[in-house]
C-alpha cells in the first residue's frame, strides 16, 4: 500500500515517512512544497512529489493518482500569517480530500486538532480560534466526503522522543503527546481498518500504540 | 414580515434597514455589535438586537426567534486582521445559518462576493484569496442547509449613490455596483420568492431592480 503524506516536511510527516519506510507493509510518497526538501525523503528511499498545497486540486490529484491512502498532516504553522490558516488548514485540506475523490483513493487520515467542536471554537482564545475554526470545517468536510476517513485529534504536540505508549479514545483528558508517537498512531491507523469512519483523541499514556488503536 | 439584518451597521445594512422601514411590507430588526450603534436604527423606527457575531449560535438564535427572514451582510472589513476573515465571513455566517435553523426561520439571504467558485479562490491575489475562500465555504454551507436561500454575488462595491438600475444574472461581466443598489436588490429578493434556491451576480446596469430580480 502506497501512502501519500501531505505535509511530509513537517515534524510528524518526517517521523511518519521514516516509520513507513522502515516497515515492510507500506511505502511512502512524500508531498513537499520545494524540491530542496526532497533529499531527506530520498535518503529514506521514499518517493517525493513537489506540489504546493495552494495550487489547484488537479495538481494535488495528479500526485494522488498512484497511491492507496492519503495522510493530511500539513499545517500553516505558527510562523505564517493568519491568512494562511484558512488557505492551508482548511482550503488545503479540502483540496486534498477532493483530490483523493478525483483520484479514486478511498482511505484518508486527517491529523486534526485536539478539540475542533463548535464549543471549542467559542472557548478558544481569540488568537487560536481561527485555527480551531479552520480545523473544524476541514473535519466537517471530510466527514461528509464519503471517503474511508479516520480523524486523529492529538493533544498538545511536543518534540519529546516518542514513548510508543499513548492514551486514545473518543474523549480523553487533554495532555501532551510527542509528535513521534502521533506518527506511530497514524501508522497503526493505516494498518487497522477498524479505524475507518472513526475519530479519536490521543495523548501520552500507558498503552502500546497498536493496542490503544486496536481498542478504538 | 420581520427581517433580521445581520451586519446592519455596515453600509449595505444601513441602506437596507432604511429601505425596509420606509416601505410598507416589511419591518427590520437590526443586529448590531455595540449598543452605541443603536440610535441610527431607532431613528428609523427599527428594532435592534445587540449581538456580537463571534458569540455562540444560541445568542444569535435568540435574536432570530421572532423574525421571518435573515439577511447576512456582515463582513470582517478591510481594517480587521486576517484572522477575522474566518471568524466573521465564514464562521459568523455559519452560526447565523445554524441560528436560523434553530429558530425555525426558513428564509435566508446571503450577501456573498462576486465569484466564490473554486477557480476564483485559485485565481485570487494571495492577499484576497482568504476572503474568497471564507465566502466560498459560507456559500457552500448555506447551499447544503435546507434553508430557503438566495445568494447575491455583488460586483465591486462603491459608495456611489444608487441608480435603481442593475444588471443581474447567473454570470454577468464584472463591474462596479453601488452599495445602495445592492440594498435594493436584497429588498426585491425578500419580496420575490422566485429567488429562493437561486444565486446571481449583480453589477450596475440598465434594468430597474425589481424587473431585473423578477427575471432571475
Image (spheres, coloured by chain):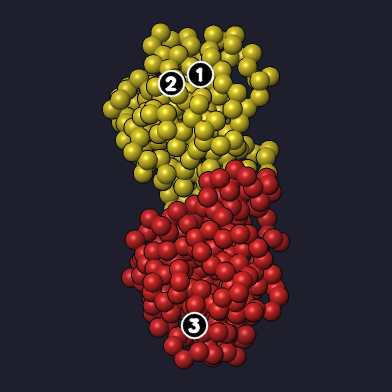
Chain colours: A red, B yellow
Q: Could you tell me which secondary element the residue under label 2 belongs to?
A: loop
What residue did someone put label 2 on?
Answer: B67
Badge 2 local density, few (<14 within 10 Å), some, or many (20+)? some
Which residue is at a point 47% across and 9% down the rendered structure image?
A: B22
Spatial separation of the CA atoms under disc 2 and disc 3:
55 Å
Q: In the drawing, does residue B215 fall left or right of residue A1?
A: left
- Which of B147/A157 is in front? A157
Q: Could you tell me which secondary element the residue under label 1 belongs to?
A: strand
Q: Tell me whether the residue at label 3 lies in contact with that at label 1, contact meaning CB atoms closer than 8 angstroms.
A: no
Which residue is at a point 55% across and 84% down the rendered structure image?
A: A19
User: Looking at this rendering, what residue extends furthest in the front direction?
Assistant: A206
Quadrant (top left/top right/bottom left/bottom right) for the C terminus of chain B: top left
What residue did someone put label 1 on?
Answer: B29
Q: Tell me, yes or no, whether dots 2 and 3 are on the same chain.
A: no
Name which quarter of the figure residue A162 lies in: bottom right
Q: Could you tell me which secondary element the residue under label 3 belongs to?
A: strand
Amino acid at each position: 500500500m502506497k501512502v501519500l503524506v501531505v505535509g511530509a516536511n513537517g515534524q510528524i510527516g518526517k517521523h511518519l515517512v521514516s516509520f513507513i519506510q522502515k516497515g515492510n507493509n507500506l511505502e511512502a510518497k512524500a508531498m513537499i512544497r520545494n524540491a530542496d526538501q526532497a533529499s531527506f525523503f530520498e535518503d529514506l528511499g521514499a518517493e517525493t512529489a513537489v506540489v504546493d498545497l495552494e495550487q489547484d486540486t488537479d495538481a494535488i490529484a495528479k500526485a494522488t493518482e498512484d497511491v492507496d491512502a492519503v495522510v493530511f498532516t500539513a499545517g500553516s504553522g505558527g510562523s505564517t500569517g493568519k491568512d494562511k490558516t484558512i488557505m492551508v488548514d482548511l482550503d488545503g485540506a479540502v483540496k486534498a480530500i477532493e483530490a483523493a475523490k478525483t483520484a479514486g483513493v478511498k482511505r484518508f487520515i486527517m491529523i486534526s486538532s485536539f478539540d475542533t467542536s463548535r464549543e471549542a471554537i467559542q472557548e478558544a482564545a481569540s488568537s487560536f480560534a481561527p485555527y480551531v475554526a479552520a480545523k473544524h470545517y476541514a473535519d466537517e468536510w471530510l466527514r461528509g466526503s464519503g471517503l474511508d476517513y479516520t480523524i486523529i485529534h492529538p493533544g498538545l504536540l511536543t518534540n519529546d522522543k516518542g514513548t510508543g505508549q499513548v492514551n486514545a479514545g473518543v474523549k480523553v483528558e487533554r495532555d501532551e503527546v510527542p509528535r513521534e508517537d502521533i506518527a506511530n498512531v497514524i501508522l497503526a491507523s493505516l494498518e487497522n481498518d477498524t479505524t475507518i469512519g472513526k475519530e479519536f483523541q490521543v495523548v501520552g499514556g500507558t498503552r502500546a500504540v497498536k493496542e490503544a488503536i486496536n481498542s478504538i
